Image (tube, rainbow, N blue to C red):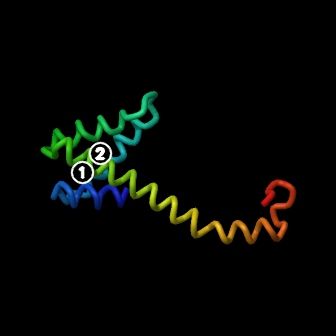
Amino acid sequence: MIAWYLIIAQLSGVKSFWLHFCVYYMTNLARRLPGLLWYLVGRAYMYEQKGISKSTVALGSALEAVLALVAGLIVYLVSLPLFNKVAQSGWFGYWVQS
């Protein structure tokens, strides 16, 4: 949520935390709907009602996805040595084979 606020506030110039909070959580409910991109359509529509262009929202969503991917990769790489050490010590026993 904070990452989304920082991204879209920087891109759009609108610094209203409450606006970005509401849009983020309302459109995250749409992620539960069947289909892939309903939340993006919802974000674009809700922000367009507030005067923020669809292209700004699309760029913000793309940056959010890249940021999530990079953060996941960093967490994976940082935790990999720890996981290998624990797996070699036999702590996981039968379930983890290195």
Residue labelled with disc 2: 23
Q: Quadrant of residue 17?
A: bottom left
Residue labelled with disc 1: 19
Where's the C terminus, which quadrant? bottom right
**Amino acid identity at mark 1:** Leu
- Count up the numbered dots: 2
Disc 1 on helix, strand or loop?
A: helix
Outermost residue toward the top in this view? 34
Residue visible at 44% across and 30% down in the picture: 33
Q: Is residue 10 left or right of residue 31?
A: left
Disc 2 on helix, strand or loop?
A: helix
70 vs 35, nearest the viewer: 70
Residue visible at 28% across and 51% down in the picture: 60
60 vs 88, nearest the viewer: 88
Contact between labelled residues 1 and 2, with CB atoms less than 8 Å apart? yes
User: Is disc 1 surrounded by few (<14), some (14 to 19) or many (20+) residues within 10 Å?
Assistant: some
In the image, residue 81 sits, relative to residue 7, either above or below, namely below
Outermost residue toward the front in this view? 98
Where's the N terminus, which quadrant? bottom left
Residue visible at 30% across and 57% down in the picture: 5
Task: Give the percent coordinates (x, y) of residue 75.
Answer: 54, 64
Q: Quadrant of residue 82?
A: bottom right
Q: Is residue 91 left or right of residue 60?
A: right
Task: Give the percent coordinates (x, y) of residue 69.
Answer: 46, 55
User: Is disc 2 surrounded by few (<14), some (14 to 19) or many (20+) residues within 10 Å?
Assistant: some
**Amino acid identity at mark 2:** Val
